[in-house]
Amino acid sequence: MTSKLCSLTEAVATHVRDGDTVILEGFTHLIPFAAAHEIIRQGRRDLTLVRLTPDLIYDQMIAAGCCRKLVFSWAGNPGVGSLHAFRRAVEQGIPSPIVIEEYSHFALAMRLFAGASGLPFMPLRSLRGSDLPGVNPSISTVTCPFTGEALDAVPALRADVALLHVQRADTDGNAQVWGLTGAQKESAFAADRVIITAEEIVPSSVVRADPNRTLVPGSKVSAVCVARHGAHPSYAQGYYDRDAAFYDAWDEISRDHDRLRAWLDAWVHGVPDRDAYMRLLGEERVQQLAAEPAFAAPVNYGRYA
Amino acid sequence: MTPCSRDELMIVTAARALADRQRVFVGIGLPNVACNLARRLHAPDLELVYESGVVGARPERLPASIGDPTLVSGAASVCSLPEVFLYYLQGGLIDVGFLGAAQIDRYGNLNTTVIGPYDAPKVRLPGSGGACDIALLARQTIVIARQTPRLLVERVEFVTSPGHDRRPGKLRSGSLGSGSLGSDLDPCGGRPGSDLDPCVERFPASSSMQGSRSDPGTAQRSRSDPYGAGPQLLITDLAVYGFEGAPAELTVRSLHPGVTREEVAARIPWAIRLQDDLPVTPGPSDRDLAVLRQVRGAVVGSG
């Protein structure tokens, strides 16, 4: 197979376009910050951004002016409080108003599940009794053809491109994760194009010796890029811990739009790539976040020649 | 006895509402602290399930969020987010959903979405996350929150997670196309005599309001009912509340030590009837406090 390895700059330039529907998934774990920063650097506009938890990653993209519409289910700074750029956009239209479309976690996960499965919608038991259906016309109901039971229903969500960070991948784009996988797999299969950023590129023999760990096969991947520490300030299980101090600091940085823009100037526009970002972060911080190793026992797949 | 803060009393009381071997869906914030405390006190086999996909977590440090890597290391299982909502929550395997709240009303409706009009919000809150799903599908829910003057309102401005007057109840076959809450509304949300362990029984109803297990609001979901019984307890830093009547509404079960009736009444913005002889919530033991302070990693000042 032809190598899909390229720089993140090239991958975003080729595959992410103004006006696209874009998913950057990773539920608290493996949040693809390096990819988001590249999208901000390249000045993409009018994106429909989809994510269960917008987190700091979409707070930064909203402040940078990338977002026209946000599809989400929980918009907070986990364990800290509000997402201030998100709130400024919703409450005051700064830097520009955004359209919001919100769900519960279950409902948005089912939108991705339907999109990945080639179904027009998914039924679920949730949302009824809530005021969410009243503010979101995409939430509906359906009658079970077998029991007559009334169920809630959400439409399939398809995206132009999904950007996902993983622990390791090979140059074919076969991407492997462990720890929390959130809705990463549904996001990959619900998207027309998939960009993978990886902590490390490993030989294909490593991936193929442990295929249960593959999130998405290379055949479904458009580009694979190296982004060491590409999920900072979130974490990569076994590689580095969540930078809780940064999540705390973001509360202050993001309270003021100008201060947030100054942060983007220094940490996103002011660096060419993730390696430069990490040099700015400094070796001491990197060392503090390093995870102590804890290996699982190897499993025996057997050889059947 | 070691002096303790009202905050600590709230968390210990919340931990006591959980029984060993229950499977609990753990929300972000205070529920996370209370559930981890319960597991280290009286409920070592409490199965902690997090919406991030972790089942049977044994965290070595207090998780900073529901997706903390310490939840993964040593867990019984890690599954995808669709799997945890489909198989565990909608599949009926969650005994207790443990939620925090910004605003809760007389019928147990929770608002974590917006203060002011939805389209022109005064304060935009984070939204549902898994809360709406948990409130509807866990067999019962417990809510823990600090009782600021803004916590309790007669009617929430936005129902994120349905309480007792908004519950779907049992959906019978034949309720064709009934997508809205109409004639099939059944506030009882379950049937009496199930074999489930209701957390409310650890906080008995006041004598004048004592009811059987068939009382609305204390009834448990039967195996045939796909929806849960809704909020059964609200635990704050001032008092323990239950839900009684039809539809079930907030009642005071006990006052925390040192809290007066007037103090509680001042934080409830509707005419609530407080019985004359309200019990006092049992305080934490020295061991409870020692373990709590160890779990939180810092000594919290008293008062």
Image (tube, coloured by chain):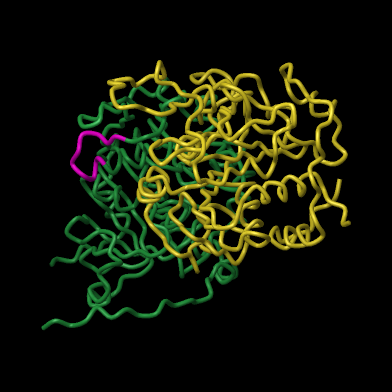
Q: Nearer the viewer, residue B223 or A57?
A: B223
Q: Specify the quadrant of the image occupied by residue B58.
A: bottom right
Where residue A84 sits: x, y (%)?
Answer: 57, 37
Q: Is residue A236 above or below residue B96?
A: below
Chain A: colour as depicted: green
Q: Is residue B244 above or below residue B32?
A: above
> Going by the picture, which residue comes out furthest to the left?
A305
Where residue A177 sits: x, y (%)?
Answer: 35, 64
Give the quadrant of the N terminus of chain B. Answer: bottom right
Give the quadrant of the C terminus of chain B. Answer: top right
Q: Specify the quadrant of the image occupied by residue B297.
A: bottom right
Q: Is residue A18 above or below residue B247?
A: below
Chain that is yellow in the image: B
Relative to residue A236, is residue A166 drawn left or right? left
Q: Which residues are magenta?
A: A114-123
User: Which residue sits at x=44%, y=41%?
Assistant: A61
Q: Is residue A274 above or below residue B274?
A: below
Q: Is residue A121 magenta?
A: yes
Q: Is residue B234 magenta?
A: no
Where residue A70 sits: x, y (%)?
Answer: 40, 34
Q: Nearer the viewer, residue A150 or A278?
A: A150
Relative to residue A4, is residue B35 drawn left or right? right
Q: Nearer the viewer, residue B240 or A63?
A: B240
Where residue B101 sits: x, y (%)?
Answer: 61, 35
